[in-house]
Amino acid sequence: MPRTLTLDLPDLPATHALAARLAGLLRAGDAVLLEGPLGAGKSELARAVLRAAAGDPALEVPSPTFTLVQSYDLPAGPAHHFDLYRLDGPEGLAELGWEEAREGIVLVEWPDRLGEQAPADALRIALAPGAAEQARRAVLSGWDARLARLARLAA
């Protein structure tokens, strides 16, 4: 079982394909932590995961940059998309309903703001821009058995 999985995503369709594979593995209590610099594709991947998990490619998925969290009712249960860029640290998580959200699926951009509240069993996806405009490199870690399944799906 791989402990990390590195994927080169040459374009948006490849990013969306990864999101669809990931969406098929999500279950209540999961946390997906999206790391990377501004413009690395964190929001794009989160949107694609939510649309795939909803089974609705036209699902409106606004950025939670200003609201800090957007919630969705998905067939697999509730999901919450957090963008913690403007949060100073974990002190503000209670106001955002973090504990309640953890009962469902959480996708978190800027997870460094979680501090000690970052789930140890999370799937971490570190994104970095690639050479081409829409290319990305994704390094996934965590989830052990499911990461192995994701690796098989990606092959």
Image (spheres, helix red, strand yellow):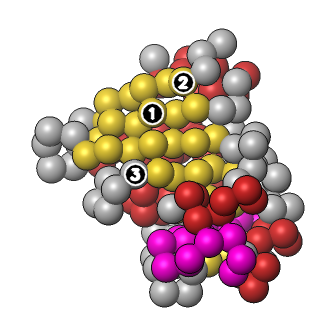
Q: What amino acid type is highlighted by mark number 1?
A: Val
Q: Nearer the viewer, residue 61 or 118?
A: 118
Instruction: Give the alpha-carbon distance from disc 2 to disc 3, as whole Å.
Output: 16 Å
Going by the image, does 70 lie left or right of 77? left
Which comes before the other along the chain, label 3 or label 1?
3
The residue at the point 82 percent across, 52 percent down is: 29
Classify residue 127 as left or right of residue 107. left
- Horizontal side of residue 19 vs 26, given as left or right: left
Which circle marks residue 4 in the picture? 2
**Magenta segment range?**
77-92
On the question of residue 51 being in view, the answer is: no
In three-dimensional space, the C-alpha distance between marks 3 and 1, rounded to whole angstroms, equals 10 Å
Give the residue pinned by disc 1: 139
What residue sits 66% from the left and 13% below the top? 1
Is 151 situated above or below 126?
above
Position of 98 relative to 96 (above/below): above
What kind of residue is marked 3? Answer: Gly
Q: Are marks 2 and 3 in contact (CB under 8 Å)?
A: no
Asked if disc 2 and disc 1 are in contact, CB closer than 8 Å, the reply is yes
Q: Is residue 104 magenta?
A: no
- Judged from the image, the secondary structure of the residue bearing numbered disc 1 is strand
Q: Residue furthest top?
A: 1
- Mark 3, residue position: 36
Query: What quarter of the picture does the C terminus occupy?
Result: top left
Give x and y (percent) for residue 17. Answer: 43, 40
Q: Earlier in the sequence, mark 2 or mark 3?
A: 2
Q: Amino acid at mark 2?
A: Thr
Residues packed near mark 1 inside 10 Å, few (<14), some (14 to 19) or many (20 plus) = some
Give how far apart the Cα atoms at labels 2 and 1 are: 7 Å
Q: Secondary structure at mark 2?
A: strand
